Image (tube, rainbow, N blue to C red):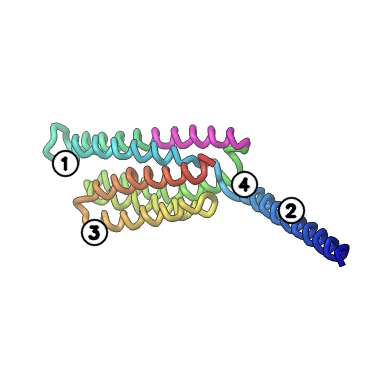
Amino acid sequence: MVFEINTLTLQFKVLLYNMEKQIEDIKAIREMMEKSSKFLSLSGLSGVIAGVTAILGAVFGYLLILHNPGETDFNRMQELLILLVDAVVVLTISVSFAFYFSWKKAKKKNIKLINKTAFKTIYNLGIPLLVGGVFSIICLLQGNIELVASTTLIFYGLGLINASKYTYEEIHYLGITEVILGIGAAIFLYHGIIFWTLGFGVCHIVYGLIMYKKYDLN
């Protein structure tokens, strides 16, 4: 009787060990599939830097031009040029830090930064951004500055939603947040700078910190 109990106990332990090993194998396979199908080098710190840069850019544009458009020391074309340069500087700094932190994270995790999934992510994000950028420039050139905030937020949000299937799920919710803020900026047309600052500044910082804590620190 004792022998039979010991045998059953041993069989149960072997079965439990095999189950644990199978679970570990499934987890390993899942991680391999995730690495091959998703762009996981995106760093939360790049979101934080982008948010801070956007806030500084918004403050600069507001104090110099947007708080009293048409009544500054600059003519209309100069105002538009300054706003364009401001936007380009913000975008350049954000993209540069995004590339740097992503490269650093990829190096740490010993994975390739530039791969097929990265190109898919960039492509799906880039198309809405390009269309939104062109449309925003048209709005600026036609003097419809108040439309730019809602346009950039909505197209950026759509780009994030479009690209989120190739990267972290938080990007999807960030995209939805940006679209909602863009709609808000369209409703409250002359308070667009507030929604723009919330979307590109505060939301980037908040989501960046969440992603940094969840993915980068582990």
Badges 4 and 2: C-beta atoms under 8 Å apart?
no
On residue 187, which mark appears? 3
State the CA–CA distance, disc 2 to disc 1: 64 Å
Residue position for label 4 = 35
Q: Foreground: 155 or 79?
A: 155
> Residue type at mark 3?
Ile
**Of circles 3 and 2, which is in front?**
2
In the rendered structure, the answer to whether residue 115 lies left or right of residue 138 reads: right
Q: What residue is rendered at 38% in x and 39% in y?
A: 50
Task: Estimate how packed mark 4 is, as few (under 14), some (14 to 19) or many (20 or more) residues with alpha carbons within 10 Å.
Answer: some
Q: Quick check: 189 above or below 97?
A: below
Report the residue marked by disc 2.
21
Mark 3 lies on a secondary structure that is helix
Please say if 103 is above or below 198. above
Label 4 vs label 2, nearer the camera: 2
Q: Is residue 75 magenta?
A: no
The alpha-carbon separation of the residues under discs 4 and 2 comes to: 21 Å
Q: Are marks 3 and 2 in contact (CB under 8 Å)?
A: no
Q: Residue furthest left?
A: 71
The mark found on residue 67 in the picture is 1
Q: Looking at the image, which residue is at 36% across and 56% down?
A: 179
